Image (spheres, coloured by chain):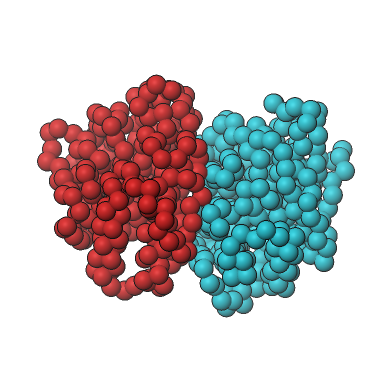
Chain colours: A red, B cyan
Amino acid sequence: MCELLGMSANVPTDICFSFTGLMQRGGRTGPHRDGWGIAFYEGKGLRSFHDPEPSADSRIARLVADYSIKSRVVVSHIRQANVGSVCLENTHPFSRELWGYSWTYAHNGQLDRQLFDWPLTFYHPVGTTDSEYAFCWLLGQIRSRYPERPSDWAELQAFIHACCDQLRGLGVFNMLLSESTHLFCYCTTKLAWITRRSPFGEARLKDCEVSVDFGAETTPNDVVTVIATEPLTNNECWQKLATGEMVVFVDGEVVAQLKE
Amino acid sequence: MCELLGMSANVPTDICFSFTGLMQRGGRTGPHRDGWGIAFYEGKGLRSFHDPEPSADSRIARLVADYSIKSRVVVSHIRQANVGSVCLENTHPFSRELWGYSWTYAHNGQLDRQLFDWPLTFYHPVGTTDSEYAFCWLLGQIRSRYPERPSDWAELQAFIHACCDQLRGLGVFNMLLSESTHLFCYCTTKLAWITRRSPFGEARLKDCEVSVDFGAETTPNDVVTVIATEPLTNNECWQKLATGEMVVFVDGEVVAQLKE
């Protein structure tokens, strides 16, 4: 089961997703009956697509598959609902503005209900999931600590890592988070990444029947990192994150790696 | 030239937009070269599509045209850029969360540059348009005055009206704003609306080559109000808003009408 899928690259990459298998299985009995969503950054701009409905004939999936969106940061999520009903406002990724940046977030896992007692400050959930509540709490913590965009990102990264550790205290918290340049990846149970350089091929997600093709328009200088719940291929060496580890990517390269 | 287009209805309405003419004209020389965007509410959830690029072959326009999205509140905008370059983050409608609701906003007009000296509080623009800055200012004013969702919406509406009056002091401020249930429409120079009840037909926007078909699945009890920069049809009696007037719709019906 694929849950989280992210990308960080050093040039806008013409990432093509194929949802063929996913779309065929997206019925009431399929594993992906609870929707999926994907967010692409185009500069500071954010374009996102959400599909809460089970649909073997998803026009939105087809659009995303057909429409070549060039992006340096992608955050996506395929949902199997646990907390919160299946509806548009409960479909990841979630987004909020902070410091004039659109922050986007997707979560895999389940958190104890006591999360809902944690006080919120600036951001409030529109839906009813634990995931969105955790995002509002996390971004509120960042904003309280850093009312303005800090110049010292090392300190900020340590702070985000500490907040994620707190959330992990409530259960499983695997997360992708971005503000358009940085991609923060935090692991409780499973998250793996690989950095690819040219020549690029196709990465096939066997478990969730999504394939990603980076080969179309890449150049020799391109660096593309893919992060997913499980390694997407068997013939490459994926780096698995440890429990409590956070890795931060910029332009496809690791800029910070914070261990438990 | 069509700029703003909104809808308020008492049941989720299967609104079908046809962008045929628009797509054909969407080249470098066409009037809609600066993109367009549309936001649909599905309950509290918000689904939006933005297309900043001139494109005579817009897949997103085709998706919106093909995909039957049932919605009670729609806010859309076709842009001719004045302030701010043509890019995703400068494409209307803009959205921010307040009180656990996704607020969406689109603006037609141009405001004096002194707007950028007005202090912002909670919300900051991601792009560089006067329109998004005005939205951030407006929503910040609402939030400062009402940290929590008020029970008295008459007072809130008067407050929003007063804020819009302030913005009108800087130039042309025609606006559509919603939080999922209420549709606030403020006029400086041009904005018109019509409430339709069954039987529904097609409304053709001659000036911007967009047509809207409400006939597909409406029932005798349906009430659908359409708001646009200019009346869309010649054979019906559209209500034109006066300068400084704000009309608020809920379920397709007028719930408040505030004059200058």
Above or below B249: residue B131: below
Q: Is residue A10 visible?
A: no
Q: For the C terminus of chain A, which image quadrant?
A: bottom left
Residue drawn at (51%, 50%), measured in percent from left and top? A126
Left or right: A197, with A141 as reference point: left
Residue A209 lies in quadrant: top left
Left or right: A162, with B218 as reference point: left
Front one among B39 and A81:
A81
Front one among B256 and B190:
B256
Above or below B162: residue B106: above
Above or below A144: residue A75: above
Q: How many marks?
A: 0
Front one among B62 and A74:
A74
Residue drawn at (68%, 51%), measured in percent from left and top? B182
Above or below B33: residue B43: above
Left or right: A88, with B177 as reference point: left
What is the x, y in percent for residue B59? 50, 36
Front one among B147 and B166:
B147
What is the x, y in percent for residue A215? 26, 38
What is the x, y in percent for residue A37? 41, 40
What is the x, y in percent for residue B230? 77, 49
Residue drawn at (72%, 47%), measured in percent from left and top? B250
Q: Is residue A167 visible?
A: yes
Q: For the N terminus of chain A, which image quadrant?
A: top left
